[in-house]
Image (cartoon, rainbow, N blue to C red):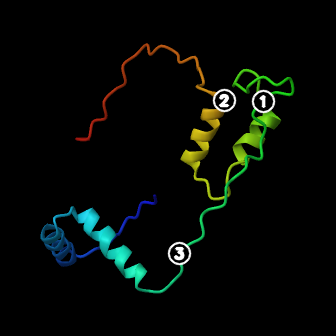
Amino acid sequence: MAALTIDNLDDNTRAKLRVLAERHGRTVEAEIRAILTDAVAETGVPDAAPAATFTSAYPTTTPEGEPLTWDNVDSETLDQIIHGGPPDEDFVAALGRVFGLLGDADFDVPERTEMPTPLDLDE
């Protein structure tokens, strides 16, 4: 399901939505969903076609048939994986797909030797 953010909604409209939601025994979010669903249904616009199934355009195994990991993936294959997602894929979804395929990455994080100095906002 998609998420929707509405900017610049005036306080009076928000208050009226709260009253309507209470009247119908719903949350404000559920009330807005019902209002939008009813409004769109009355337009006569046909339902959207289901999204096409995406077939990956990148390899998931090495040429030897082993599952890809961070240790055995070459730069060309990694590039194919990074750019081989659906055309409407956002950055976070792409990261999830890449790490989901290759697994967690282990990095050497150096031990902190000094505590950071707090920022002095009074200066």
Secondary structure under the numbered disc 1 in the rendered image:
loop
Q: Which mark is residue 84?
A: none
Q: Which residue is mark 3?
A: 47
Q: Which amino acid type corresponds to the residue marked 1 in the rendered image? A: Thr
Q: Which amino acid type corresponds to the residue marked 3 in the rendered image? A: Asp
Q: Earlier in the sequence, mark 1 or mark 3?
A: 3
Rendering coords of residue 64 (x, y %): 86, 23
Label 1 and label 3: CA atoms lie apart by 38 Å
- Badge 2: residue crowd in 10 Å (few <14, some 14–19, many ≥20): many
- The answer to whether residue 94 is above or below residue 102 is below
1 vs 3, front mark: 3
Label 1 and label 2: CA atoms lie apart by 10 Å
1 vs 2, front mark: 1
Q: Which residue is mark 1?
A: 61
Q: Using residue 54 as the reference point, say whether residue 5 is left or right of it.
A: left
- Give the residue drawn at x 52%, y 15%: 110
Q: Which residue is mark 2?
A: 102
The one nearer the camera, 25 or 29, is 25
Q: Earlier in the sequence, mark 1 or mark 2?
A: 1
- Give the residue drawn at x 77%, y 47%: 57
Q: Do residues under tags 1 and 2 come within 8 Å of each other at their CB atoms? A: no
- The answer to whether residue 88 is above or below residue 32 is above
